[in-house]
Image (cartoon, grey):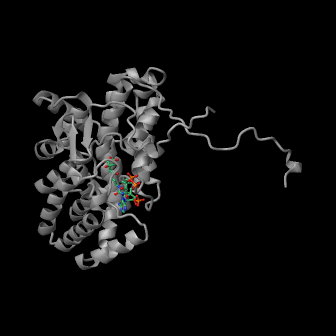
Amino acid sequence: MGSEVPPVYIGLKGIYVAKTSLSYIDGERGKLIYRGYSIEDLAEHSTFEEITYLLWFGKLPNKRELSEFKENLASEREIPDEVISIISKLPRNAHPMDILKTGVASLGPFDPDLPSIWGQHIHEKRAENLKIAMRILSKMPTIMAYFYRMKENKDIVHPRKDLNHAANFLYMMWGREPNDLEAKLMDVALILHADHGFNASTFACLVTASTLSDLYSAIVSGISALKGPLHGGANEQALRMLMEIGSPDNAREYVKGKLERKERIMGFGHRVYKAYDPRARILKKYAEMLAKETKQEKLFNTALEVEKVMIELLGRKGIFPNVDFYSGQVYHMLGIPTEIFTPIFAISRASGWIGHVLEYWEQNVLIRPRALYIGPMEAKYIPIENRI
Ligand code: SDX
């Protein structure tokens, strides 16, 4: 090893490892754009299908393109009977992210296009990969909804083609069509979670894809990474925390106690944002509206107090609410079970995961960093009979 010790960037903090045109995060000013469009504009005016088209194809679709894209997605929602059977055999108390991971992994072997593109040129088969991409994106909500219905001992509700992505997911979960507000809020949540630069789960997808493995395997890597409480799993933890706090009056003592014990407050802080996460700002508005509609102001006011105390204590360190702090409240007030929060994140982020894999495959380079070796050198082998 040379004399000079190279710098080591634990966790790749602040390191640029590729270029992308999909999304940009301005961490200092708390801004997020997808292909140049502000997340505020997209949340207000767009739909999940439209922003997925934007992320995958680089432009907003015209009427014909969007209608065709939506039709193609909707036609791929059903999953093979064999995969339904696999899901039905999984333990009902398994974490839904493990069900989602198993379900997506089980889809791969049944995909008719995979065998023909497997191998050294898989990254050049864009047409086939787009068909696979649509299958994965469209089938993930179905896997989750079917598992949820089985867990509740209810008949599974098969997908409908006349509902958009968000509304169809709720329909398969609830067995009834969502009202306009419910459908709109789910669509906004899917838009907000769709992409976010090289977050841990997106990077996990790219590491797998960069070996020229397949899209199913890459998405399984992403689901596995997103499950963690430091990443997508924080939305579930943040809501459980608010329930535990119980009322605004308990917030200050609870937060101070956790910080004194060096514990993390889930839903706060971010590797890139050192300002308020713009997605949290949008979700906060909907959480406030839903709190009034569903008479759950106490939960929302508790969140407001936690936010106030956290910004008072850690705002100067750049720690503010992130997307996970208010998303859980919106899902909870929509009547979605807490353990389904992170799978919803995955259902949405599959759009960005796939978009980044398709983009990275255009100039694929195997991702293989180095580790600085600090172990012993030239150790002498000692036969086992001579070891103490
Ligand atoms: C998502 O990357 C993405 O884009 C992710 C995401 C996406 O869309 O894909 O935005 C989604 O994952 C949002 C983040 C959800 N996770 C959480 O809410 C979990 C709680 N947050 C933290 O664990 C933390 O903020 C991270 C993991 C998100 C980021 O941490 P970093 O960048 O690794 O920074 P760090 O852990 O080194 O923290 C720096 C300091 C530490 O204090 P000191 O040791 O310097 O004294 O800030 C403190 C930390 O203790 N800190 C917190 C805190 N977050 C950071 N202290 C209390 N509560 C927190 N939430």
Query: Residue 223 at x, y = what percent?
Result: 40, 46
Residue 88 seen by the camera: yes
Query: What's the residue at 38%, 69% (across, down)?
Result: 259
Query: What's the residue at 22%, 48% (across, down)?
Result: 30
Closer to the camera, 313 or 161?
Answer: 313
Residue 153 seen by the camera: no
Q: Kindly indicate the quadrant of the structure image that contains residue 48.
A: top left
Closer to the camera, 27 or 79?
Answer: 27
Closer to the camera, 301 or 370?
Answer: 370
Closer to the camera, 30 or 129?
Answer: 30
Q: Kindly indicate the quadrant of the structure image that contains residue 151.
A: bottom left
Quadrant of the picture in which ligand 1 is shown: bottom left
Query: Residue 163 at x, y = what percent?
Result: 17, 45
Q: As displayed, is residue 231 above or below residue 164?
A: below
Q: As displayed, is residue 244 above or below residue 340?
A: below
Q: Is residue 300 left or right of residue 232?
A: left
Q: As displayed, is residue 327 above or below residue 300?
A: above
Q: Locate the N terminus by quadrant.
A: top right
- In the current view of this chain or complex, which residue is farthest to the right? 385
